[in-house]
Image (tube, helix red, strand yellow):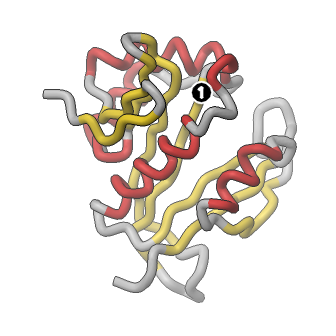
Amino acid sequence: MQSILRGSNGRTYRRAQSSDLIPIMEINLKTLPEHYSDYFYESLLAEIPEAFIVALEGDRYVGYIMCKTEYGFSSFRRLGFVKKGHMVSVAVLPDCRRKGIGRILVEEAIKGIQSRQCVEMYLEVRCSNNGAVRLYEELGFIIKQQLNSYYRDGEDAFLMAIEFGSK
């Protein structure tokens, strides 16, 4: 059963399923320098399908987002140990960027993370990716830290986080 979350401008956003993993991996290979094993995609889909979402234009896959949940120190509370979401990867095909697809993917993933009773969510983003940093800030994420030489190519990352409120 396909769970359509939203339709917008001829695009459909829905929860991913196992049959989507090959097209998702193809988008990842075309758009990002960070790649993952088949097992990693499968494990995230099994763990939290509510926050593993694909964007389609007709039958064409144009973007995805995948997240996981974990327990760790809060980005907001001193000495707080919390359940939080981690946005692992989000990608949109180059010819489909700047059309709001990434925004909707992130908004829907946030809903999925919140449905799992997470009190915050975080991500890492390249410091040079000004468009993504701006989008995350517009959605309420705050830069909490700069991670030096975070990426394999030596580029720094911003650790950004959002707090959902006390639960």
From the viewer's side, name the closer residue of 3 and 155: 3
Q: Is residue 2 left or right of residue 91?
A: left
From the viewer's side, name the closer residue of 130 and 24: 130
Whether residue 96 is situated above or below residue 114 in the rendered picture: above
Q: Where is residue 16 shown, x and y percent of the image?
A: 32, 29
The residue shown at (59%, 80%) is: 76
Q: In this figure, which residue is indicated by the disc labeled 1?
A: 92
Does dot 1 land on a helix, a strand or a loop? strand
Q: Determine which quarter of the picture holds residue 20.
A: top left
Whether residue 87 is situated above or below residue 30 in the rendered picture: below
Q: Where is residue 109 shown, x and y percent of the image?
A: 42, 49
Quadrant in which the N terminus is drawn:
top left
In the displayed orientation, state which residue is furthest to the bottom: 78
The residue shown at (37%, 11%) is: 59
In the displayed orientation, state which residue is furthest to the left: 1
The residue shown at (44%, 65%) is: 84
Q: Is residue 29 left or right of residue 50?
A: right
Quadrant in which the C terminus is drawn:
bottom left
- Residue type pointed to by label 1: Val
Q: Where is residue 154 shown, x and y percent of the image?
A: 86, 37
Q: Where is residue 144 shown, x and y percent of the image?
A: 72, 69
The residue shown at (70%, 58%) is: 159
At label 1, counting other C-alpha atoms closer than 10 Å, the crowd grade (few under 14, some 14-19, many 20 or more) is: many
Q: Determine which quarter of the picture holds residue 57.
A: top left
